[in-house]
Image: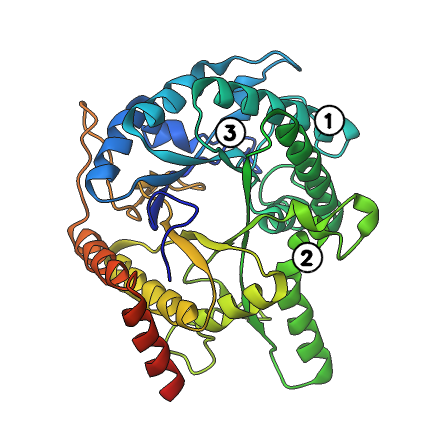
Amino acid sequence: MHQAKLFDSFFMGGFECSTHRRRDGQRLDLIHSSGHDRWAGADYAQLATAGINTVRDGLRWYLIERQSGRYDWSSFLPMLRAANEQRTQVIWDLSHYGCPEGLDIWRPEFVDRFARFAGAVATLVREESDQIPFYSLVNEMSFWSWAGGDVGYFEPNAHGRGLELKHQLVRASIAAIESVRAVEPRARFVQTDPIIHVLPDSPSHQDTAAAEGYRMSQFEAWDLLTGERWPGLGGKPEYLDIVGVNYYPHNQWILSGSRIFRGDSRYRPLAGMLAETWRRYQRPMVITETGSEGHDRASWMRYICEQVTLAMARGVPIEGICWYPILDYPGWDDDRHCPAGLLGYADGEGRRPLDESLSLELQAQQRQFALLDSKPAMEALLFDNQSQ
């Protein structure tokens, strides 16, 4: 039942590709600082040996379009060609936060310029490969709106303008979808956002309503894309193609901000969150980001796979699980070594150490999900689930 109808491998790897400016003005470029720009081919090959043939990766718009309408593909073409050479299927992020210098995200020019850029990318990808392309156009519109529009964590460093930013990002996504489809009608789109759970500080009506309002905001960007909310933005059901849910250990909290940890009786099982999202949109779903650090990596992978298996037994069509990031990387705020990947930092020849515990868990889960390809196995799982 879980067969990868859309993707070449059920288990995927995500390359951290953020390019935003922090509030202090420093530009991040995680593709560069993780060494992936230099070693893309080796990275794809090493993942293939681990049974990962589908990845999320990104273009660095700020490098490609330094001047409006003039594209320098030198930072992207080697990655694209390496993926083709290694037969790695890529979901390409076009804007993983961050814009070219001098582009005002609040102005109509942002929407128009992003749409033209998306069309140019689609044209290039079509010229280089005959495979059906997958794109994640604007990564995590809800998170970007909060981080960049509400709390000034990174660009555009605004406060109290989150909904306005979300509307602008949705406009850009819609325009880009149209631009890509004009070039490549076969293109598929993975729209990613975090799924969250928020509980009130107290049982008061005010706190309960506030917590539920916050929780329901997780669906807002997808609702805007479909036209369910604010249809004047131009949303239509066909703009929501594949729902990409991002889920980490910190995605559940009390309204006050204190985290709810796994094992707490108030912690909501992921399977239920996946089922809620599926019922709401009835679209193919992918876990587009999940991961943890250090010694928690293997146990987190096990938990995610258990919950995905349970959701699938209940009829939720999960098409894949993407470990993110798949490489260790320097932290956004302090450049600390974040030991979050299946693979570590590269040596001078592009070789990366393998995290043994996560690798062993991944192999075990790959075997388990391969068994679930059989109809009798899934029927037995469904029976066990219903009998509990």
The residue labelled by disc 3 is 27
Residue 5 horizontal/vertical position (percent): 41, 49
Q: Which residue is mark 2?
A: 220
Residue type at mark 1 is: Asp
**Which is nearer the eye, 362 or 279?**
279
Q: Secondary structure at mark 1?
A: helix
Q: Is residue 180 left or right of residue 234?
A: left
Distance between mark 3 and mark 2 Cα atoms: 28 Å
Mark 3: which amino acid? Arg
The CA distance from mark 2 to mark 1 is 23 Å
Q: Position of residue 210 (x, y in %)?
A: 69, 72
Q: Is residue 134 left or right of residue 359?
A: right
Q: Quadrant of the N terminus?
A: bottom left
Q: Residue at x 67, y 79 (%)?
A: 208
User: With 357 as the anchor, is 388 left or right in this view?
Assistant: right
Q: Secondary structure at mark 3?
A: loop
Mark 3–mark 1 distance (CA, rounded to whole Å): 23 Å
Asked where in the image residue 209 lies, by quadrant, the reply is bottom right
Q: 273 and 18: which one is in front?
A: 273
Residue drawn at point x = 65 percent, y = 14 percent: 69
Percent position of residue 296, x then y: 27, 61
Question: In this view of the protein, can residue 239 be seen by the observer?
Answer: yes
Residue located at (61% from left, 77% from top)? 200
Of the residues under marks 3 and 2, which one precedes in the sequence?
A: 3
Quarter of the image where one finds residue 33: top left
Of the pair 1 and 290, the residue shown nearer to us: 1
Q: Position of residue 76 (x, y in %)?
A: 44, 21
